[in-house]
Image (cartoon, rainbow, N blue to C red):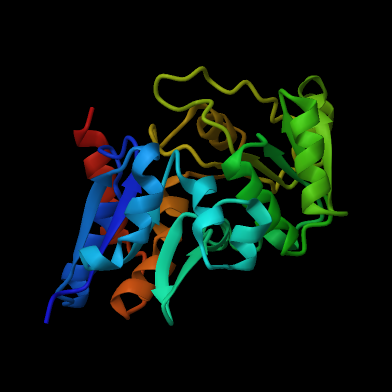
Amino acid sequence: MSVPKACIIGHPVKHSRSPLIHHYWLRTLGIEGDYERLDVPPEIFKPFVQTMRDRGLRGGNVTVPHKERLVALADELTDAARNVGAANTIWFEDGKLCADSTDGAGFLDHLDEAAPGWDSLDGHAIVIGAGGAARCIAFALASRSVPDIVIVNRSAERAEILARNVGRKARGCEWRNLPDAVRGASLLVNATSLGMEGQPRLDCPLQGLRRDAVVNDIVYAPLETDLLGDARRRGLRAVDGLGMLLHQAVPGFARWFGATPKVTPELRTLIVADLVGSH
């Protein structure tokens, strides 16, 4: 009998840490299986997905630029994938191609772990950005007891569109009004690539946040961004982006390999070492 196999599909995909994560779980759980990194250009994405089972693959992760294309190909979508209009995890069930978006759940799982009680605070949440990650995070926050979600983006129109899609808890905000929007917030999330290595820094005023606020940056390279450093200096709780990457991988592994893995300090240390070693 062939061993269970999964993969990550993207273009480019060589920098993905997913194989490191899943091979760690396979090893520590004693499961004989494999997880591959496959560079699939957009022009062959559809036929590749349609022949995954013929290749012995039980499913996989999907990253840029294929997440939105996947929604049109799937036979069944989870509510999360349908809401955000994109998917990052696929598997086969009863002969059907199923797709999920696990980023939002991964974001919440890490936030619960790193800043317990964050959703019991009275202030509103700020989400900076209106792209794919921001969509996942905004919908995830709307599922919790967050009273108000303010979406701030350089394109005010995109912020408004996302807010309307998320629903009554959300509203859009122009970038120039960010200092006013931050006042009284209990959670601030950078859901953009600003602050990532090779990208401009995110200039965001934190002085208006509540004293018990949480600042979460989904960027994990570098692990300690300027935004998080500023938050720590102000005595705020700072949450990095690596945990979201680790937690979003859990549901897929469980689907493909039949065991639910744990996000452990050892796994985090492994990925941090890889991040450091790649520079």
Q: Position of residue 22 (x, y in %)?
A: 26, 61
State the residue at coordinates (40%, 19%).
198
Q: Quadrant of the C terminus?
A: top left
Q: In this view of the protein, which residue sits in the foreground, 255 or 193?
A: 255
Report the side of 174 relative to 134 (left or right): right
The quarter of the rendered structure image containing the N terminus is bottom left
Residue sticking out furthest to the left: 1
Judge whether 115 appears above or below 26 on screen: above
As rendered, which of 216 and 254 lies closer to the eye?
A: 254
Tell me where residue 129 appears, x and y as whole percent.
65, 34
Give the image location of residue 28, x and y in percent: 19, 71
**Viewer can see residue 114:** no
Q: Camera-side residue: 271 or 163?
A: 163
Image-quadrant location for residue 167:
bottom right
Which residue is nearer to you in this view: 196 or 134?
Answer: 134
| Horizontal side, residue 57 vs residue 246: left or right | left
Q: Based on the displayed image, in which of its 4 quarters is residue 159 positioned?
A: top right
Establish if 217 lies above or below 108: above
Q: Residue 222: x percent and y percent?
A: 39, 32
| Number of marks drawn | 0
Q: Residue at x 40, y 69 (%)?
A: 91
* Left or right of residue 254, residue 278 in this image: left
Left or right of residue 24: residue 209: right
Instruction: Tell me the residue at 37%/60% (across/down).
Output: 50
Residue found 32% across the figure and 72% down from its top:
256
